[in-house]
Image (tube, rainbow, N blue to C red):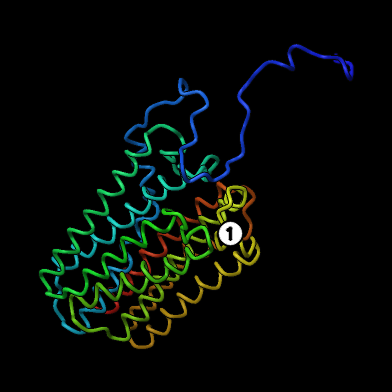
Amino acid sequence: MLVAGTPSKKRKRPGPSKQPSRGNPQKVHEARDPRHVEPATTRDWISAARLRTLPLAVTPILIGTGAAMLVTDVFHWVIALFCLIVSVSLQIGVNYANDYSDGIRGTDDVRVGPTRLTASRKVKPRAVLTVALVFFLIAAIAGLAIVVRTQQWWLIAVGAVCILAAWLYTGGKRPYGYYGLGELFVFVFFGLVATLGTTWVQAFALPQEAWFGAVGAGLLACAVLLANNLRDIDQDRKAGKRTLTVLIGRTATRWLFTVIVLVAFVIACFLGLFYPIAWLTLLALLSALPAILIVWSYRAPRELVVALGLMSLTSVAYGAFLCWAFVA
């Protein structure tokens, strides 16, 4: 038993002290005990790609291709395939780029969810950056192939802006993801640009259906990001990452999440008035409603990983049903 004021040798034993992350973008935080850091495995690399988010890259291609067939009545499968390569490569690239940028800032020092390669010190930051750049390069090559095939040379500028936006989400000196703009850019690039771009390169036209579908895809992509940021709200606040969720708080984020998910389905119902199969999109509510319930009732941040996965599934089901409705 220790008496107050009595010194104790046991209490003076040196040990690793936790230092709060200060978000220093200039250098990587050194591992406190490198001997205990295991090298990254193949599973770690795959986990860092955040496979749960990849359906978001598929949804706009499905909707955009379906909308294009309303105009051309021809399935340009090669162009659609290259659009998919661009979209998926950008999604994976931005995931690794976020791993690198957040890792060197210390934002990911304490995080729930997939393995963070940079923050865990399992991999050198330069290796993670290199992988991100490789996927950006794959997206650029596939995009250039589309440009050559369609002769739409102005799309090179669009592609460059997409890659730049993917990097600046958490990279650079003033990443827009740290200033509450993540959802806006996700809506624009993974909703409008991806969907309308897919339609344009196949049909050289943008029917109203493509615009409605693009808005729906963008809203569901925003919902996934909101679930992700709600999970990380405490860590982001401490690290100085001012996501939209940090700025508006938990309750407002829950309401925003619910509203944008339901609005996406209202759009699908409107399209169902003209394309009856679009009503089947409501089946995707079987995964969307549980996600909404989790967002409102979760007790531990890890539960929101499930909500994130459910919303990704909702997104790709939404896109598949709309595509079917357009081509049927």
Q: Locate residue 32, reporting x and y percent.
A: 52, 26
Observer-nearest residue: 49 or 51? 49
Q: Quadrant of the N terminus?
A: top right
Q: Locate residue 267, reporting x and y percent.
A: 43, 80
Which residue is at 36% across, 65% downward? 317
Q: Quadrant of the C terminus?
A: bottom left
Specify whether residue 131 is in view: yes
Left or right placement of residue 52 versus residue 12 in this view: left
Dot 1 falls on a residue whose secondary structure is: helix
**Kind of residue indicated by mark 1:** Val
Left or right placement of residue 179 versus residue 279 in this view: right
Observer-nearest residue: 7 or 71? 7
Which residue is at 18% across, 60% downward? 142
Q: Is residue 9 above or below residue 90?
A: above
Left or right placement of residue 46 versus residue 9 in this view: left
Q: Is residue 302 above or below residue 180?
A: above
Observer-nearest residue: 192 or 238? 238
Q: According to the image, label 1 marks what residue?
A: 295
The residue at the far bottom in this view is 274
